[in-house]
């Protein structure tokens, strides 16, 4: 039976009550984070909580009163659900108001958090890689805000499954923007890592940031520029990053194999470096 955290209290999921007038429900006025834990310790929690603050500020949503203790609530939620390795999902909406576009809620913002067990290093995506399709990026222009308005992503992922692949990468006039729930990297013929620079057109992935740092330390050359769709045909490797994918090899795009259609050496090396990092991160952050 799962225990969630809702507006100041730990409750059984089936007992939780959220108002039908919650603006997260009526207007999609909400933001979220997904932070993973390995052996009971969170990976890059400060970066996730900093991004939550940026998302809240960008939408003009008041931080929940629990903001300063979020990290300890996250930990307690893991314990209450008996999760050592898994994720915490955290959602904040602006709260309850009459259904009117501009009315500001009088009460607190709504905070909901849940924990789920998952072994990210054992998923088929991580171990074997994924096949993806391309789709024009029809989302709004503030993809840097981690909003709960995820209908385009839900549709893109469902469409991918209907087409026999597991995910969708979005593109715009400049090239690949990001995956439906991940950032995208390409390895060119010289071993250079290419990924789109941050802007309002994509989410600043915490995993992306960490991979860039680890890759730089390991001596890789990095080129932050848009990946052209045509480049996928000649790429040596391609992979996606996210809190839950970690680093997942991309084996084919729109039915065309990337190189020999197998996970590449650079991708495997970065998986290895990232897993070593998250194992150590657990120890380093045990006292946060
Ligand atoms: N882009 C999008 C659209 C996402 O939904 C996600 C995952 N939430 C990411 C990138 C990756 O972000 P992170 O590495 O912080 O999980």
Image (spheres, grey):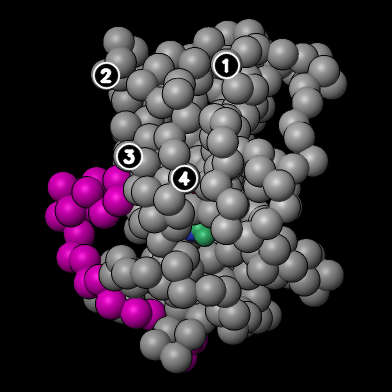
> How far, Cα to Cα, is label 1 from label 2?
28 Å
Quadrant housing the C terminus: top left
> How far, Cα to Cα, is label 2 from label 3?
19 Å
Question: Earlier along the polypeptide chain: callout 1 or callout 2?
Answer: 1
Say whether residue 224 is left or right of residue 236. left
Residue 117 vs 222, above or below: the answer is above
Question: Earlier along the polypeptide chain: callout 1 or callout 3?
Answer: 1
Few, some or many C-alpha atoms within 10 Å of disc 1 (few <14, some 14-19, many ≥20)?
few
Which residue position is annotated with label 4? Answer: 61
Determine whether the residue tagged by mark 1 lies in a helix, strand or loop: loop
> Dots 2 and 3: beta carbons under 8 Å?
no
Residue 274, percent from left and from top: 36, 40
Residue 18 vs 177, above or below: the answer is above
Residue 275, percent from left and from top: 40, 35
Q: Nearer the viewer, mark 1 or mark 2?
A: 1
Residue shown at 45% from the left, 21% from the top: 66
* Residue 23 visible (yes or no): yes
Magenta run includes residue 244? no
Which residue position is annotated with label 2? Answer: 284
> How far, Cα to Cα, is label 2 from label 4?
32 Å
Q: Quadrant of residue 11?
A: top right
Residue shown at 75% from the left, 31% from the top: 18
* Residue 167 visible (yes or no): no
> How far, Cα to Cα, is label 1 from label 3?
21 Å
Q: Nearer the viewer, mark 2 or mark 4?
A: 4
Question: Earlier along the polypeptide chain: callout 4 or callout 3?
Answer: 3
Which residue position is annotated with label 1? Answer: 8
- Residue sitting nearer the eye, 77 or 38: 77
């Amino acid at each position: 039976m799962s225990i969630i955290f809702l507006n100041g209290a730990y409750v059984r999921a089936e007992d939780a009550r959220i108002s039908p007038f919650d603006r997260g429900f009526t207007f999609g006025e909400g933001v979220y984070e997904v932070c993973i834990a390995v052996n009971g310790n969170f990976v890059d929690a400060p970066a996730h909580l900093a991004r939550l603050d940026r998302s809240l500020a960008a939408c003009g949503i008041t931080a929940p009163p629990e903001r300063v203790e979020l990290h300890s609530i996250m930990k307690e939620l893991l314990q209450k659900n008996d999760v050592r390795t898994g994720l915490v999902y955290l959602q904040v909406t602006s709260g309850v108001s009459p259904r009117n576009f501009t009315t500001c809620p009088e009460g607190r913002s709504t905070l909901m958090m849940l924990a789920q067990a998952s072994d990210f290093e054992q998923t088929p995506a991580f171990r074997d890689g994924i096949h993806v399709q391309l789709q024009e990026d029809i989302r709004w222009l503030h993809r840097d805000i981690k909003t709960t308005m995820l209908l385009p992503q839900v549709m893109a992922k469902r469409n991918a499954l209907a087409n026999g692949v597991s995910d969708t990468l979005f593109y715009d006039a400049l090239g690949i923007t990001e995956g439906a729930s991940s950032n995208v990297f390409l390895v060119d013929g010289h071993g250079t890592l290419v990924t789109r620079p941050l802007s309002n057109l994509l989410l600043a992935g915490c995993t992306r940031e960490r991979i860039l740092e680890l890759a730089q330390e390991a001596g890789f050359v990095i080129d932050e520029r848009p990946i052209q769709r045509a480049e996928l045909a000649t790429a040596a490797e391609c992979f996606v990053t996210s809190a839950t994918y970690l680093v997942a090899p991309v084996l084919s795009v729109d039915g065309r194999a990337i190189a020999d259609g197998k996970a590449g050496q650079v991708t495997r090396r970065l998986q290895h470096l990232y897993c070593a990092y998250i194992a150590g991160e657990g120890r380093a952050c045990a006292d946060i």
